[in-house]
Image (tube, grey):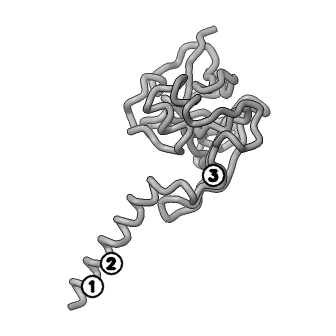
Amino acid sequence: MKKRYFLKAGVAIVGAAWLSRYLHGNSGVIAVADEKFEITKTAEEWHKILTPEQFYVLREHGTERPGTSPLDEQYAKGNYECAACNLPLFTSETKFHSGTGWPSFFAPIEGAIATTTDNSLLMTRVEVHCHRCGGHLGHVFNDGPPPTGKRYCMNGVALKFIPG
């Protein structure tokens, strides 16, 4: 009896965590046309300029699979811009190899990002957004290198690398 109870409870917890990925009401900000961002568009307008994967990550707060972005291994000099609105977000000088499978940085360009509280996946995290269009970029954690101790763990599909 006890084993069956724990099995059912475990399945319920795993199911809730998986389902929360698809429930967008748990995040502090959903970037939609009526939000107060410098650049706002309807879902139809975003669909016209973003790939399906970019739309899923930037507009629906999705996450790309780890290890799938070529930007994770990009270490040339340049800037990383928002894939939705071209705002420079990070520089190559702040990029580091985190071993997580996502491009990681220890600091953004000043004023480029906004953060909100994300209570999805049965935990509280700090979600990172583009300051100009509200696009979801990833999350920031307190386990990064000096000098900030931060790890801005970004979805590569949400970024564009501009050499320079």
- Residue 126, which numbered label? 3
Do the residues under discs 1 and 3 have CB atoms within 8 angstroms? no
At label 2, the amino acid type is: Ala
Name, please, the residue furthest toward the bottom.
1
Does residue 97 appear in the picture of this structure? Answer: no
Q: 18 above or below 80? A: below
Instruction: Bin the neighbour count of mark 1 within 10 Å (Cα to Cα): few under 14, some 14-19, many 20 and up.
Output: few
Name, please, the residue furthest toward the top.
164
The secondary structure type at the circle numbered 2 is: helix
Q: In this view, does 138 lie to the left or right of 63?
A: right
Do the residues under discs 2 and 1 have CB atoms within 8 angstroms? yes
Locate residue 20, reporting x and y percent.
46, 59
Residue depicted at x 40% and y 66%: 16
Q: Mark 1 points at which residue?
A: 5
Q: Distance between the residues labelled 2 and 1?
A: 6 Å
Total number of numbered discs in the rendering: 3
Instruction: Bin the neighbour count of mark 2 within 10 Å (Cα to Cα): few under 14, some 14-19, many 20 and up.
Output: few
Q: Mark 2 points at which residue?
A: 9
Residue depicted at x 59% and y 40%: 136
The secondary structure type at the circle numbered 1 is: helix
At label 1, the amino acid type is: Tyr
Q: 5 above or below 61? A: below
At label 3, the amino acid type is: Val
Q: 128 above or below 122? A: above
